[in-house]
Image: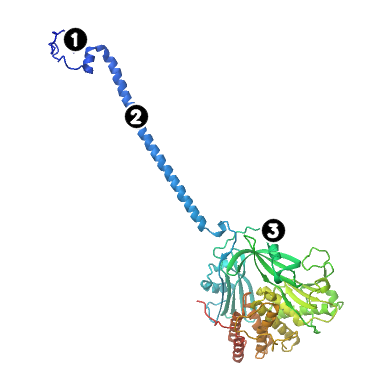
Amino acid sequence: MRCKFCGKKIKKNSEICICCGRNINEELGTDDLIDAMPELRDDFDIISKMQAKDKKKKEKKEKRAKHKTRRIVIAITLVVLILACVAVGMLLFKDMNQTKQPEEQELTTSAIEAPFQKRFAGANFTDIKIVDAESAKEVINSAKSTFNIKDVDSEFELKSETKVGNTTIYRFGQMYKGIPVYGGEMVIMADEQGTAYALNGAYVTTDGLTTTYKLDKGSASAAITESVNSMGDDYAVTSGVSITEIEKVVCNVQNKTYLAYMANVSGYNTNGVYISYHVFVDGISGNGIGAVVTSSFENGADITQDLVEESYIYEMITANDKFNWNDETIPNAEEPISITEVEAGNASAYVSGIKTAVDNAYKFFNSSFGWKGLSGNGESFKVYINSNEYVEKTLPTEKAMYTNGKLMFFREDMTLGEVDYNTVVHEYAHGVMANIVGFSGTMACDENAAIAEGLADTFAELAEARLTGVAPDWIHGERNLAIPGEGYHISTSTAATINNMQNCYEYSTIVSHMAAYMSEYVSDISVQEEFWFKAMCMMTRYTDFEEFSSILEAVTQEMHSNGRIDEMQYGSIMTGIEMLGASEQDLYSIE
């Protein structure tokens, strides 16, 4: 037998090879096989290299697998992070969308809950010396916390600067991002030394109000028409309807502030009465918000007077059978009245009397207050003179009115008699007050309208006294203003109850009676004129009898301090103011 290790012959059944010394019973290893069969060495080398290469591939593959797993984990992590960021972003966007400004939201109405703030201050309410509009604005700035005003410079613009005697009254209109705020204003009175005597403020809160209109002017006009057609009572216009001057405004109604459109509306209501008013619709939804009357009426008696002519800045107009007050597209519906013919005496006493009366009304307000025409700056205006035949047959036989920059006089027959001068000045005064204060008309049926009516009566009496050189008789038409008849008032201890136009007249005598009372102690007409014009200039369209009393107190103190009324007159006037019975608030200081 041979040794399986070295291949040499050995004895049978030998366990140890005498040649190599190996135990025949041991197992052959790889090296033994290679030694036994040298021809396999190269194959084993190849196999060994292949195994090493496979091992490297396996290791590399395992390494790649680990890298791939790591990349997948990283990718998944990134995706999760991105999704988390998107989710957080969406939540933030949703939260921002809920808290962003109203103009960025999809609104169905512009209305925001916002209080309307009014405040009157007099008697040492500021130490700031007022020498011009800028220093007057500083006074508003000093009182801004009282009204919660955010920025005086951007929210208020000077509307007028009216000098009356040695006093200047500054009126600032409220603005909201360039949009006028209806009724929002600050009025300040100061004497020539710069001493401030009163501040009257009406402020509309606008925090959070949108500035983005959904409606354009065309759709706003349609919405206004719809709103007008849905109105009832005295506001329902049934014929001759006219909608003009649509403009953007901010208004406050029942403690809600709106981004709105406003238009002048006029025509005949269901009672056949010509009416004009401002109507408001929401600039977002187009829904109606409300209306404010702008027309005032006056019935007058026939009184013939020899009046002095004055140059005119107005047009006199009558109508023919094609006439409609508001439709200016109808050709030849309005016929101008030749001023030359009137001055030559080729007109009825009624027509020529109205021209003369308007001339003198213009002269009165110009010479006494420097107020030229209705607007104060000499702009032309229209005076309509018409028979009911061409207007509205249901109108009373005599009626006069002011509305939307126009004076109107009606009569059944324009050939009979002259018009009462008081009546013309009364309506002219309404036009002046509307341009200065923006008073509501008689048909508004509130205390403000009653005060305006009383002031118109007062200016009419003073104008007549100025013209004739005789003290006022305080007789206006058939009414005795010094001693009002049954149903008329000289004081009110509680809120006035005004439900109709007649109530306005009944409460208007609170003002005119006070004027008649004052004239007993102050005979100088110029002092009386100054007193009432200052009082009127300090008012807003929201002034009621309580505030009116405070205004009269402030004016009295200012005129007394500047020597326009003496000590006795001061005491008498203050007593008269207390007799009004409406002043429950004392003058106070704004801090």
**Residue 166 position in % (x across, y down):** 62, 81
Q: Is residue 404 left or right of residue 495?
A: right
Q: Secondary structure at mark 2?
A: helix
Q: Is residue 422 above or below residue 10?
A: below
* Residue 215 picture quarter: bottom right
* Residue 64 picture quarter: top left
Give the spatial CA distance, label 3 vs label 2: 78 Å
Q: Which residue is mark 2?
A: 60
Q: Which residue is mark 3?
A: 218
Q: Is residue 474 left or right of residue 120?
A: right
* Residue 555 picture quarter: bottom right
Q: Is residue 275 above or below residue 479?
A: above
Label placed on residue 7: 1
Name the residue nearer the viewer: 248 or 99: 99
Local crowd size for mark 1, using a 10 Å CA cut-off: few (<14), some (14–19), many (≥20): few
Q: Nearer the viewer, mark 2 or mark 1?
A: 1
Is residue 257 visible in the rendered image? The answer is: yes
Tag 1: amino acid: Gly
Tag 2: amino acid: Lys
Between disc 3 and disc 2, whose residue precedes? 2
Local crowd size for mark 3, using a 10 Å CA cut-off: few (<14), some (14–19), many (≥20): few
Name the residue nearer the viewer: 187 or 377: 187
Q: Is residue 259 above or below residue 21?
A: below
For image coordinates 46% across by 47% down, the residue present is: 86
Name the residue nearer the viewer: 560 or 471: 471
Label placed on residue 343: none
**Residue 42 position in % (x across, y down):** 28, 15
For image coordinates 42% across by 42% down, the residue present is: 78
